[in-house]
Image (cartoon, coloured by chain):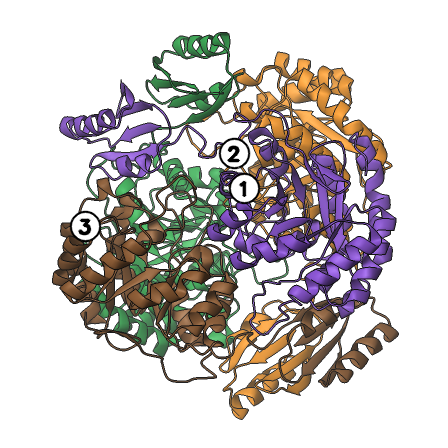
Chain colours: A orange, B green, C brown, D purple
Amino acid sequence: MIVVMNIGATGSQIDRVKEKLTQMGFGIHHSEGVERTILGVIGPKQPGVMESIESMEGVEKVVPILQPFKLASLEFKKEATRVRVGDAEFGGDQLVVIAGPCAVESEEQMMATAKAVKQAGASMLRGGAFKPRTSPYAFQGLEEEGLKILKNVSETVGIPFVTEVVNPNDVELVSQYADMLQIGARNMQNFILLKEVGKSNKPVMLKRGLSATIEEWLMAAEYILSEGNFQVVLCERGIRTYEPSTRNTLDLSAVPIVRRLSHLPVIVDPSHASGKRHLVAPLSRAAVAVGADGLVVEVHPSPENALSDGPQSLNFAGFEELIQTIRPIVEAMGRTL
Amino acid sequence: MIVVMNIGATGSQIDRVKEKLTQMGFGIHHSEGVERTILGVIGPKQPGVMESIESMEGVEKVVPILQPFKLASLEFKKEATRVRVGDAEFGGDQLVVIAGPCAVESEEQMMATAKAVKQAGASMLRGGAFKPRTSPYAFQGLEEEGLKILKNVSETVGIPFVTEVVNPNDVELVSQYADMLQIGARNMQNFILLKEVGKSNKPVMLKRGLSATIEEWLMAAEYILSEGNFQVVLCERGIRTYEPSTRNTLDLSAVPIVRRLSHLPVIVDPSHASGKRHLVAPLSRAAVAVGADGLVVEVHPSPENALSDGPQSLNFAGFEELIQTIRPIVEAMGRTL
Amino acid sequence: MIVVMNIGATGSQIDRVKEKLTQMGFGIHHSEGVERTILGVIGPKQPGVMESIESMEGVEKVVPILQPFKLASLEFKKEATRVRVGDAEFGGDQLVVIAGPCAVESEEQMMATAKAVKQAGASMLRGGAFKPRTSPYAFQGLEEEGLKILKNVSETVGIPFVTEVVNPNDVELVSQYADMLQIGARNMQNFILLKEVGKSNKPVMLKRGLSATIEEWLMAAEYILSEGNFQVVLCERGIRTYEPSTRNTLDLSAVPIVRRLSHLPVIVDPSHASGKRHLVAPLSRAAVAVGADGLVVEVHPSPENALSDGPQSLNFAGFEELIQTIRPIVEAMGRTL
Amino acid sequence: MIVVMNIGATGSQIDRVKEKLTQMGFGIHHSEGVERTILGVIGPKQPGVMESIESMEGVEKVVPILQPFKLASLEFKKEATRVRVGDAEFGGDQLVVIAGPCAVESEEQMMATAKAVKQAGASMLRGGAFKPRTSPYAFQGLEEEGLKILKNVSETVGIPFVTEVVNPNDVELVSQYADMLQIGARNMQNFILLKEVGKSNKPVMLKRGLSATIEEWLMAAEYILSEGNFQVVLCERGIRTYEPSTRNTLDLSAVPIVRRLSHLPVIVDPSHASGKRHLVAPLSRAAVAVGADGLVVEVHPSPENALSDGPQSLNFAGFEELIQTIRPIVEAMGRTL
């Protein structure tokens, strides 16, 4: 931590800051600059110290040096974490493709989708039973009925599934059915929910918040890890920017940045990021090429009849084409589907 | 709703869209433009229709015309909603000032603060018992102990209080103590929580999400209203932008825009928006002048010892100065403190 | 400047950085932290040093401490700069109101506007003769003919005017007519143009770029000041964000932040920021209350016939109402119109 | 164009809008909706009409239907434009790699770089002789001396070069030396400069502005095309967002979006976008996979001694590795280097 004093900071203000830091057990390096005094502060991380010092008279700003996440960091764990869900393994050589509709609508829809995507090359199924929707009047999901459909389809077809949990009280229920729990973008900082999934023994897919920094995203993962669950897969799904052509701006730089900071696998959702069907294939190729460990793609038997997110969903033929277009890139990256 | 077809859309694609809309019970106005066909769609709002049509072949985009919120709209209720909490009334002539620390730390801290801010001119107290924190290692609040302190201080000093609820399971508990429930920015789209506070009979302060559009914010209010609770006060607290000088960019335009769209009162939190003590006074003046119904200001007996948000907290003298500086603006606006 | 080394930085990498800094004439404070080495670097500002060090092996990041602007800073000049244009004075007690149409369209339009706005309380006229337009097919301004109209109207009515210059080659021409030169938002980092107006002896209004940080804005002012022209007035006009309700998000925090960093006056343009007529009055009140030294407001005799920016322009009656609504706030701030 | 009237719009307000549109020669489709009246407006594009109508009483908003760019659009020209610079051809099967330092510093530096990048697989050289810098105190380039160095090196090594032009007055001068002119991000809306390069007969690389929408970017291209120069290559280089980990957020979705809207080639600059050396290789792979026609990469013989942009520059070995890592992706995309 570096404490930068104001240009006009008085000697007694500087002394008070140094006293306070000393009381807290920190070592201090005092630097008298051309215009300002700067204090280098040495010692273990303590939550709240930065804010406390930044509140003192004469302090211009406090610059953090250490990363705020610990268990999620590469320093804590040097080798890549591998998260296994059925035959799918995130974090190794496999490029895990997760496919399925935004929402579970019926057993027929899910059965057809599961068969089609498995045959085309997907190794996991997705589908929402609990849907967080911007409008209270929009379809909110089939709830437990949806979970049952997912479970049945999953077992019949032989493909594991991930589904979103939105209510801390439902974590146990959803865990009874699902192979992997999804934390959606809107809930990335729902800390109560993060703690609950941290207490479960299920793999978790943690989507990046709509306007979360990469650091905040890793801090959200830290909430899950700090409860003992290390099976976390990060999922980049676009961030909010001023550009109106896409629903969100897919931030593919996040993949190599996370790789340098953390041992956790990171995958990409090009469907939600773009909100447009014709962007899913090129962005999927780019995600594979940038080094992602997997893809989450929306697929629906009949997108125009989908109860949500139709405009960005591929139909079965579209999904097959997607697999065709990414296959050479997957191979070029030394991975397998 | 306006459906804009692609430039190369075929006659049969256009026909299919028209058929589907007709089946759904909509009226259609067909416009043959220079380059494209455009369909004006007439009929009552139906969730999911836009997406469904946007998924069809030959459709370029669908432009919504009607606002997605209903109960929160000025069309639904023409006169301004007034929300009363003790002697404070939001939505009328009063400029309601809510003051207090970010987090409840002790009875002494709250008692001193409550007395000081009441004397200076505040009509409500604030303080967090449950704190959503970016880091799992930061102080998370005193929880029920904090609620008890708030209740006791509130009754002793004679000032009502608002406090945040973060867990749907705690809504009942918090409602037993608090005069008003706060939904924080990170939970603005925690729909489970919104529904729970919608079922309570307590006034609710709904903070705008970190990167929520005004429309999404009003949709979040709609969740609460649609459960039967109309005592909702909106709180602008800054949005995330690229500018690094402030923690967030306070979007004061939101106040007159909400006024034109909704009957709900809207207040401003200059402390969280800016993250800097020296900006609180000028931004408070601006908030009053733009037409806000109230202010939420962080005040702490000793900001440098605060367990959270010290850098943006005023001490008691600072809060008195704040009241001095806003008083002439409050009067110029024809309001009272 | 603080140099933060990587966690795994080797002793020889650290030594190389220290050698390089020593060669450049800097003093160094070495801090051995818990996880990393940090170097405090002391000495006068030298452009390019930060980048050079940041490029070295083993360096994680370089944190600047000194502000990059010098002549524009409060450290360089402690008292507020006053910029006088006719009877208008920016930076003192006067709240300078500049009003007029986006574009000069005809002598009649300008004459009527000048009389109306002067009578209502404006002390400067605005109007564009050279218009930077997003589309090459949109009206580009009357050019020199427009300057002649402005000059004639200005002298007849007795009100000084500001007009935009977009071409470095036109600075001399525009200076022959105008009382103040405007640098538009799109040209805030057109350094060739900044240098040219820096060489002129005319007051300059420098609009903030569409997505410029406050620091970049002050650096743009520094370009003008470094050529010898200190008569610079900064103008906040909204920044680009994700929020679609307004054309731009007016960043009123910029006013008190600039005040703490610089001696230059700062004014606000609520018309361009919002793009909507009904927001001009509330945002003008807020701008005055936050401490701005002036306002720039678009006024047109008949907004629906304006050749540009009609939706945000006030008519004469609207401008009179604006003056009525800001007057009590101006007085509450201890200023005069 | 769709005109959406206010909910409370009167019959006479609606009539006035219709009269005005009729006078302007437009056809009108009147739609009486549940809550509002909507007018579909049919006729050729006319600049300024939207704003004029949006300024009228009773109008809520005007929704554009037609794209504002014409010459740059796929409707105007269906086949992809190919831009040839020496042996490099943008817009065909070739993946054009442009490499070189941010700034020309000396003949030795350029000669070494040109040889190294050509040998490794680059087909064009880059280097700045005129540098737009945020600070007036930073290195501003060698100017004409730099152009001479570039020309000499280019001819000696046998590799064409692109260099930035920042002053409209210098377009002729730079054209005498350069094979391709670059318009930098800060000048994307410097319309005077765009017109000048539009009058030259040189190929132009047009970088996307720091916070430009894709539509504004294509409108900037339209300025160049409308002067008769169709040899324009678009370059995505990152947009400004709230995320602090990268200098800018590379918006790779822009590539397939441009492809659907325009016939112009589009390339990607991963160096400026990220500002970090370790991101250049993964983002380059992603750019190729998303379908870009080329890459612009910063390479310097000794990044730590670079006069600008060292932190994001590759050294020669780094550039060779980059070519190795993209080669299989280039092949997977059916392209050649």
The chain identifier of the residue carrying mark 3 reads: C
Q: Position of residue B10 (x, y in %)?
A: 50, 11
Q: Is residue B179 visible?
A: no
Callout 2 and callout 3 share a chain:
no
Instruction: Single out the mark in the foreground, 2 or 3.
Output: 3
Residue D222, image x, y percentages = 50, 39
Alpha carbon separation for disc pair 1 and 2: 8 Å
| Screen quadrant of the N terminus of chain B | top left
Disc sitting over residue C276 in the figure? none
Q: Residues within 10 Å of mark 3 (few under 14, many from 20)?
A: some
Left or right: A68 as drawn, with respect to B298: right
Residue C259: x, y in percent? 39, 74
* Residue A186, label in figure: 1
In which image quadrant can residue B43 be found?
A: top left
What type is the residue that disc 3 sits on?
Gln
Q: Dot 1: few (<14), some (14–19), or many (≥20) neighbours within 10 Å?
A: many
Camera-nearest residue between D27 and D54:
D27
Name the side, left or right, on which B228 lies relative to C123: right
* Cα gap from disc 1 to disc 3, whole angstroms: 51 Å
Q: Residue furthest left?
A: C119
Q: What residue sits right under mark 3 in the picture? A: C109
Q: Residue at x 51, y 32 (%)?
A: D71
- Reply above or below: B202 against A314: below
Is residue B92 something that shows in the picture?
Answer: yes
The amino acid type of the residue labelled 2 equals Pro
Q: Which of D112/B218 is in front?
A: D112
* Viewer-proximal residue among B180 and D62: D62
User: Residue under circle 2?
Assistant: A132
